[in-house]
Image: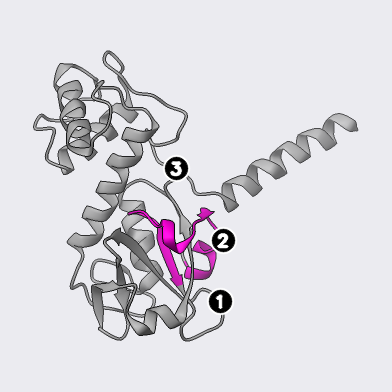
């Protein structure tokens, strides 16, 4: 009986964690370190991301060879990171953040569509979910549920990749966007009718600001 209870508790906690926490993608987990000589899906995902950021010119093979190491070192140099060619958490987070923001910016001008979650039309949370899913990171669908994920971050400590939430047409988190730095965030705006970049200092967004969550810790 005790064993059954223990198994049940373990399963319950696993499900609870999977639901409440951000599901980190591939190599970006905080636990995995990729380096020269390794191979597998995580390495291939890394190569795809480096290729998207224009620092890896070869075809992704899943093998962390000299070309991949050179690309990592090049990226680390640009970002001011330790140039060791090893993809630890800091390097992985920087790569993933840049990919998220690049994806988001590539969707500027896509029409706002209530309930939309594809490049043919987005609502605010459909946009943020699509951007993260495109980069192999799983989050919930609505702004309210996304507001329950990640870790709290003070407005004064926002960094690119953080989610910013607003209470607009309804109480609680009813609008969401992705902070891209420089006091700006990108979002699917019903007012503008499309995906746009806005200033957090805009009076409307200042008045309706609710909070921020770090989805890429």
Between residue 49 and residue 200, name the one nearer to us. Answer: 200
Q: In terms of sequence position, does the residue under pointer 1 or pointer 3 come before the other? A: 3
What residue lies at 32% left-to-right and 27% top-to-bottom? 87
Query: Percent x, y for residue 56?
Result: 13, 32
Q: Is residue 128 left or right of residue 194?
A: right
Tell me the quarter of the picture where residue 204 sits. Answer: bottom left
Q: In terms of sequence position, does the residue under pointer 1 or pointer 2 come before the other? A: 2
Q: Which mark is residue 120?
A: none
**In the image, which residues are magenta?**
142-165
Q: Mark 3 points at which residue?
A: 24
Between residue 42 and residue 87, name the one nearer to us. Answer: 87
Whether the magenta-drawn stretch holds residue 179 is answered as no
Q: In terms of sequence position, does the residue under pointer 3 or pointer 2 come before the other? A: 3
Q: Residue furthest front?
A: 156
Q: In this view, does 199 lie above or below 17?
A: below
Tell me the quarter of the picture where residue 128 sits. Answer: bottom left
Secondary structure state at the residue bearing disc 3: loop
Specify the color scheme. Answer: one colour
What residue lies at 38% left-to-right and 60% top-to-bottom? 129
Q: Name the residue under label 2.
A: 148
Q: Is residue 201 left or right of residue 18?
A: left
């Amino acid at each position: 009986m005790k064993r059954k209870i223990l198994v049940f508790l373990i399963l319950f906690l696993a499900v609870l964690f999977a639901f409440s926490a951000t599901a980190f993608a591939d190599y970006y987990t905080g636990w995995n370190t990729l380096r020269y000589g390794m191979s597998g899906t995580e390495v291939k995902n890394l190569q795809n991301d480096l290729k998207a950021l224009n620092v890896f010119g070869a075809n992704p093979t899943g093998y962390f060879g000299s070309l991949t190491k050179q690309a990592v070192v090049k990226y680390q140099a640009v970002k001011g990171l330790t140039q060791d060619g090893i993809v630890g958490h800091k390097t992985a987070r920087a790569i993933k953040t840049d990919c998220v923001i690049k994806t988001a910016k590539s969707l500027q001008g896509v029409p706002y569509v209530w309930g939309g979650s594809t490049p043919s039309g987005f609502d605010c949370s459909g946009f943020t979910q699509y951007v993260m899913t495109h980069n192999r990171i799983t989050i919930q669908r609505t702004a309210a549920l996304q507001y329950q994920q990640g870790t709290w971050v003070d407005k004064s400590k926002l960094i690119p990749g953080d989610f910013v939430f607003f209470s607009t047409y309804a109480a609680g988190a009813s609008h969401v966007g992705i902070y891209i730095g420089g006091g700006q965030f990108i979002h699917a705006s019903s007012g503008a009718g499309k995906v746009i970049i806005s200033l957090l200092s805009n009076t409307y967004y200042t008045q309706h600001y609710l909070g921020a969550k770090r989805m890429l810790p």
